[in-house]
Image (cartoon, rainbow, N blue to C red):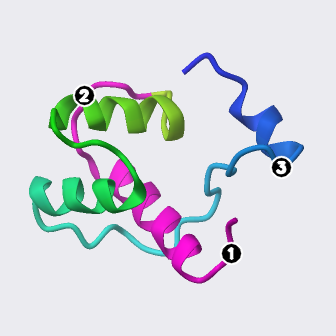
């Protein structure tokens, strides 16, 4: 959570955090979120730790390992952008 992701994104060395979320996440339960998280590239062997790792990178203001609506919406937007070819 202390890594300078914004600066790296500014020089195109990593993906920026989505600033506009198109819609709320469609994940109906934690298992659906974890499968989407795995699709994005995270190892979900230890679910709570995987969620914490995602939060450290994409939502550092709340790192608790709990899957909430905003965490889900960020993941959903990242997957949408990737699948639309908007990210590298």
| Region in magenta | 62-88
Q: Is residue 34 left or right of residue 71?
A: left
Q: Residue 5 placed where, x, y %?
A: 70, 33
In the image, taking residue 35 as reference, residue 18 lies left or right, namely right
Label 3 neighbour load within 10 Å: few <14, some 14-19, many 20+: few
Q: What residue would you read off at disc 2?
A: 49
Q: From the viewer's perspective, is residue 85 above or below residue 51? A: below
Separation (CA) of disc 2 from disc 3: 27 Å
Q: Earlier in the sequence, mark 3 or mark 1?
A: 3
**Residue at the extreme right:** 11
Reading the image, the residue beneath label 3 is: 12
Q: Check contact, mark 1 vs mark 2: CB within 8 A.
A: no
As helix, strand or loop, the secondary structure at mark 3 comes to: loop
Q: Earlier in the sequence, mark 2 or mark 3?
A: 3
Tell whether position 81 is magenta. yes
Q: For the N terminus, which image quadrant?
A: top right
Provide the residue designation for mark 1: 86
Element class at badge 1: loop
Residue drawn at 75 percent across, 36 percent down: 6
In-front residue for pair 17/83: 83
Residue 67 forms part of the magenta stretch: yes
Q: Residue at x 28, y 42 (%)?
A: 43
Residue furthest to the bottom in view is 84
Distance CA(mark 3)–CA(mark 1): 13 Å
x, y percent for residue 50 = 28, 36
């Amino acid at each position: 959570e202390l890594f300078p992701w914004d600066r790296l994104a500014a020089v195109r060395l990593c993906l920026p955090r989505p600033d506009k979320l198109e819609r709320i996440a469609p994940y109906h339960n934690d298992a659906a979120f974890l499968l989407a998280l795995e699709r994005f590239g995270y190892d979900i062997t230890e679910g709570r730790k995987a969620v914490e790792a995602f939060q450290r990178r994409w939502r550092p203001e709340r790192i608790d390992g709990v899957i909430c609506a905003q965490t889900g919406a960020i993941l959903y937007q990242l997957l949408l952008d990737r699948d639309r070819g908007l990210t590298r």
